[in-house]
Amino acid sequence: MAPLECDVLVVGGGINGCGIARDLAGRGLKVLLCEKDDLASHTSSASTKLIHGGLRYLEYYEFSLVRKALAEREVLLRSAPHIMAPLRFVMPHDPSMRPAWMIRAGLFLYDHLARREVLAGSRSVDLRSHPAGEPLKAHYRRGFVYSDGWVDDARLVVLNAIDARERGAQILTRTACVEAQRGQDHWLATLVGADGRAFTVRARALVNAAGPWAESFLRQTARPVRGGALATRHLRLVKGSHIVVPRIFTHDHAYIFQNPDKRIIFAIPYQGDYTLIGTTDVELEGSDPGAARIGEDEVAYLCEQASRYFARPVAPADVVWTYAGVRPLLDDASGDPSAVTRDYLLETNADAAPLLSVWGGKITTFRKLAEDAAGEIGRMLGEARPAWTEGAWLAGGDLSPWIGPTDRRTRPDEAFARFAAEVQQRHPWLPPALAQRLAHAYGARIERVLGDAASLADLGAEVAPGLFERELRYLREEEWVTQADDVLWRRSKLGLRYTPQQREQVQAWFARGGA
């Protein structure tokens, strides 16, 4: 059988791979993306769910990275207000950690390194009267408040993949690239699908966006034209783990806590009824990144550090869910994993058929990374085409058909609130909690899920609480879902709320073939 032909083969279905595929497809290139598991199966669904500049990176003099990330915050928030929102952070002041003048100086830089239009600036607060002081220990009397953003990370990946597909890209999930032979003017790759069948792809260029597997892909899977090695860099694989506990506080701010080891952790409102606490930085050595799990010592660490601040201690017994992801950080010889740069490097090689490898990066800078990568691919192919994503919506992000036009000064969370109210008005038969969840998940694409439904009965059987067959069919047909975990833990976080029996009901639906 003749190989599939494309301009660019992208290996890796995380945020960077999907972002690059989207950007390239929008520039008119024929793109094929393969991902060995589900989209966002690994690092990209295991983040702290933040769109942030990285306040603590200022201590490591990462001014370029912080400026780049700060500039991206509002670009991203505007592009998908249904899955991202501004978030205010409270830092209780502990004089034994960092002096107040240092924090004020850092926040001044944070406020002014990049332009802000909708995010509020930083300020000092009296925790004895501010609502954020109530759940804290009484000796924390002073604090600082600043702005960043929240994101549904796994859905961010899916929205990029949807946009890439709608611009002509082919997205193949559960499809592994097992060999990629480089030629002088093309790559010939062997891909194996979930059914075990192998097929070949002929591409003019290859993008290695394999995340934690980027180095091993070059060393074990990609083959050069002649002898030698394609890998010239080393990754440091650093595990970041998180815990989820029942809601500790009721206000809408998040916390950033300073620890005695000079690290920080966040405590973030999560899924309405929970608090998300993370993250750790643990060097991962000698194991498969896909098998990374939180350790008991990490659970104890997060509980201990959170308990230094909250009046009601956080105990391991309180933990209802955990997750761990592996950050593929470019090895810069830093001794402390926390000090390893979170910036990205795009390494190009045009000695034969073009190769671009993505090293490092963070979710906040994925769009800029993709823009830079698409520019490099165009340069190597001799087909430079203009960038386009900075002002573009992600799938479902354009709410104007529902709420009318908005401008750059419109807060994304306010636009979403108007949209959610309109959804409820147009579909009064939807229970409010379900309407809110669907509005958040699908944004302006919600009608594609609901179709012509005029009652809950029109959505089909309720497979599990608040999860109906029509949504499951949409996810299977439009969002590459093939099994229950894709729905329960990535396309949504319903698994967090369901009992084991309810999760099994979703699994049984897929086992029956959706019948």
Image (cartoon, rainbow, N blue to C red):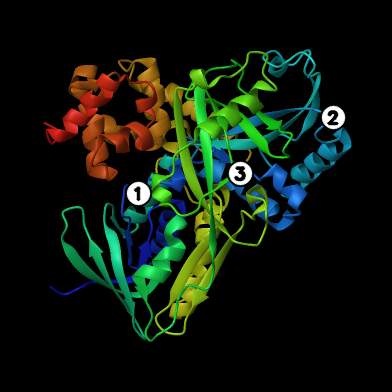
Observer-nearest residue: 410 or 359?
A: 359
**Where residue 69 appears, x then y in whole percent?**
63, 50
Q: Which residue is mark 2?
A: 95
Q: Which residue is mark 1?
A: 162
- In space, the residues marked 2 and 1 are separated at their CA atoms by 48 Å
Q: What residue type is disc 2 on?
A: Pro
Camera-near label (2 vs 1) is 2
Q: Is residue 431 left or right of residue 150?
A: left
The C terminus lies in quadrant:
top left
Placement of 378 over or under 507, stated as above or below: below
- In space, the residues marked 2 and 3 are separated at their CA atoms by 32 Å
Q: Could you tell which of marks 3 and 1 lies nearer the N-terminus? A: 3
- CB within 8 Å, label 3 to label 1: no
Residue 115 makes an appearance in the image = no
Mark 2 nearby-residue class (10 Å; few <14, some 14–19, many ≥20): few
Q: Could you tell which of marks 2 and 3 lies nearer the N-terminus? A: 3
Q: Could you tell which of marks 2 and 1 lies nearer the N-terminus? A: 2
- Residue at 61% x, 44% y is 74
Residue 221 is marked as none
Q: Which residue is mark 3?
A: 74
- Residue at 41% x, 36% y is 401
- Label 2 sits on a secondary structure element that is loop
